[in-house]
């Protein structure tokens, strides 16, 4: 009985620690299994086919200024991602005034397809998970983010030569 009394706090501590992560990267890795991912090839096909969806860039303004998806590529020249940095995503996703700047309506939680991207995919996973928690049904994260997108475009350019 004495051993059981000492074991109970250890069990409670072990159960309570479930879901605690060392850092954001570890949390993002765990979310890869619960957030839908889209490949850069599939995103490229959607852009080439002029499919309707919202492409949301959750990087910082400075990262966006360095380049973004569809920046000087051979896709629909009018298609530009919406910049909605990770730090304000939850507060602006349903703000009609914010969306007016992009000449878009607030995304519908039930029907609008939303593709999120970040620099390497980790912030995108966190952001996509947040949108799912807010009730958005059709959300995906770009696997590998902008870095992987850049690799695809560079490889396509090399292959064309």
Image: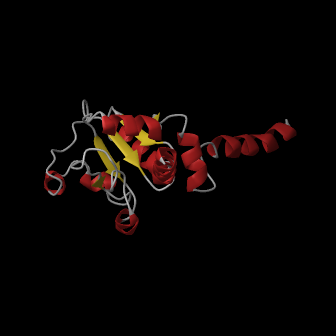
Question: For residue 10, which quarter of the picture?
Answer: top right
| Residue placed furthest toward the bottom | 62
Question: For residue 108, which quarter of the picture?
Answer: top left
Question: For residue 9, which quarter of the picture?
Answer: top right
Q: Nearer the viewer, residue 149 or 90?
A: 149
| Residue 24 locus on image (x, y percent) | 55, 55
Asked whether residue 45 appears in the rendered view, the answer is yes
Q: Quadrant of the N terminus?
A: top right
| Residue 132 locus on image (x, y percent) | 37, 38
Q: Nearer the viewer, residue 7 or 117?
A: 117
Q: Is residue 75 found left or right of 147 in the rendered image? A: left
- Image mark count: 0
Asked whether residue 135 appears in the rendered view, the answer is no
| Residue 100 locus on image (x, y percent) | 13, 54
Q: Nearer the viewer, residue 93 or 21?
A: 93
Q: Nearer the viewer, residue 7 or 145?
A: 145
Residue at the (22%, 41%) spot, across then down? 107
The coloring applied to the image is secondary structure
Q: Is residue 153 found left or right of 110 in the rendered image? A: right
| Residue 80 locus on image (x, y percent) | 26, 51
Q: Is residue 35 found left or right of 107 in the rendered image? A: right
Residue at the (58%, 53%) spot, across then down? 25
Q: Is residue 86 above or below residue 130?
A: below
| Residue placed furthest toward the front | 161
Residue at the (56%, 48%) spot, across then down? 27
Residue at the (63%, 44%) spot, across then down? 16
């Amino acid at each position: 009985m004495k051993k059981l009394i000492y074991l109970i706090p250890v069990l409670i501590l072990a159960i309570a620690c479930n879901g605690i992560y060392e850092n954001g990267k570890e949390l993002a890795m765990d979310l890869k299994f619960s957030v839908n991912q889209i490949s850069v090839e599939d995103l490229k096909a959607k852009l080439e086919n002029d499919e309707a969806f919202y492409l949301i860039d959750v990087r910082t303004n400075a990262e966006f200024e360095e380049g973004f998806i569809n920046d000087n590529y051979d896709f629909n020249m009018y298609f530009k991602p919406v910049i909605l940095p990770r730090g304000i995503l939850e507060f602006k996703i349903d703000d009609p005034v914010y969306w007016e700047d992009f000449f878009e309506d607030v995304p519908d939680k039930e029907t609008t397809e939303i593709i999120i991207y970040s620099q390497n995919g980790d912030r995108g996973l966190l952001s996509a998970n947040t949108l799912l928690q807010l009730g958005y049904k059709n959300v995906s994260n770009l696997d590998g983010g902008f870095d992987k997108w850049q690799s695809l475009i560079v490889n396509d350019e090399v292959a064309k030569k």
